[in-house]
Image (cartoon, rainbow, N blue to C red):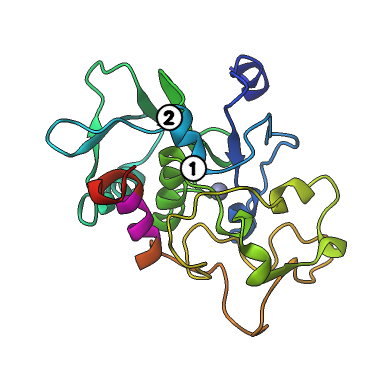
Amino acid sequence: MSRQGKMQKLPHYQYLVADHHLQYHYSYTCIKSNIAVPTGLQNADPCTARGCKWKRNRNGLVYVPYVIANQYSPDEIQVIKRGLQSFTEVSCIRFVPHEGQRHFLHIQSDSGCYSYLGRQGGGQVVSLQRPGCVHHYIVQHELLHALGFHHEQNRSDRDKHIKILFENIIPQQEHNFMKRKTNNLATPYDYNSVMHYSRYAFSRNNEPTMVPIPDSNAVIGEARNMSPNDILRINRLYCDIALKK
Ligand SMILES: [Zn+2]
C-alpha cells in the first residue's frame, strides 16, 4: 500500500509529518520525495479542538492502543516499547496493546520516520523504518506527533527564538519551516525539545537552516529524550483538567 494512495483518502484536516531530517543523522537514505501533505491544517495541536485528540478515560488516563508490526528484531521492539513506556512515567498517556479498539497506532517500518498529526480515526500508521528510525528519541518524537504535537520550529512564536535561513534550505522543503498557529499551552519555546529540528535540517549546502536568537551558538535540536517542556505540554493538553476550558 503506497502512502500516496493512502494520502488521497485523507480527510482535509489530516496531516502527515515526515521526518526526513532524522534520517540524516544516520546517513540513511531511503527517502521518497513529496511525502508531506500540508492539506489545510494550519496549526498544530489546535486540531485537537477538531477531533484529533485522543479521548480521556473516566479514570483520567488516556489510553492509546498500538500494534507493532512483525518487522522488527527483539532489540528494536525493546527500543520501541521503551519509548511507549516513557510516557507512562511522566503523564496520563498509556500506550496499550491493541485489543480491538476502534482507534489505534500501527507502528511499522515504512519508508522513513513519519506520523500523522493527532488521532486520525481507525488505524493510523506511525512509521519507524528500520534501522534508521528505531531510536528512543525518534520513537518519542513520532508518538508526540500522533498525540497532536508539531515541530518546535513551526511554533507561532518561533521568530523570536530562531531565524530561518531560507537561502540554505533544499528547494521544495521550505514547507517544513512554515510558521503555524500553534497552541503553545503556555510553555516556553524550547531548543531542547525532542520536537525541535537540528540546525542543519534540510540544508542544501551544509550551511545552517536555522540559527538561534539572540545566542547564535545555543544548542538546538539535539535532544535525545523528551524535555521537561515536552512533558509539560502533554500534561497540559491531556492530563491537567484545571487548564482545560
Ligand atoms: Zn517530526
Query: For the magenta stretch, what is the residue range?
Result: 230-236
| Mark 2 crowdedness (10 Å alpha carbons): few <14, some 14-19, many ≥20 | many
**Residue 97, position as x, y percentages in the image:** 23, 30
- Label whose residue precedes the other's in the sequence (2 or 1): 1
Residue 156 can be seen in this image: yes
Above or below, 206 relative to 120 = below
Q: Quadrant of the C terminus?
A: top left
Residue that lies at the very extreme toward the front in this rendered image: 245
Residue at 35% over, 21% down: 103
Q: Disc 2 marks which residue? A: 119
Q: Report the front residue among 77 and 195.
A: 195
Q: Disc 1 marks which residue? A: 45
Residue at 58% over, 54% down: 22
**Badge 2 element:** loop
Q: Is residue 231 magenta?
A: yes
Mark 2 vs mark 1, CA separation in Å? 11 Å
Q: Main secondary structure of the magenta part?
A: helix
Q: How many marks?
A: 2
Residue at 50% over, 68% down: 190
**Residue 194, position as x, y percentages in the image:** 47, 60
**Badge 1 element:** helix
> Residue 95 has which mark?
none
**Residue 173, position as x, y percentages in the image:** 77, 48
Question: As shown in the figure, which amino acid type bears the numbered disc 2?
Answer: Arg
| Mark 1 crowdedness (10 Å alpha carbons): few <14, some 14-19, many ≥20 | many
Question: As shown in the figure, which amino acid type bears the numbered disc 1?
Answer: Asp
Dividing the picture into quadrants, the one containing residue 74 is top left
Above or below, 158 relative to 37 = below
Q: Quadrant of the N terminus?
A: top right
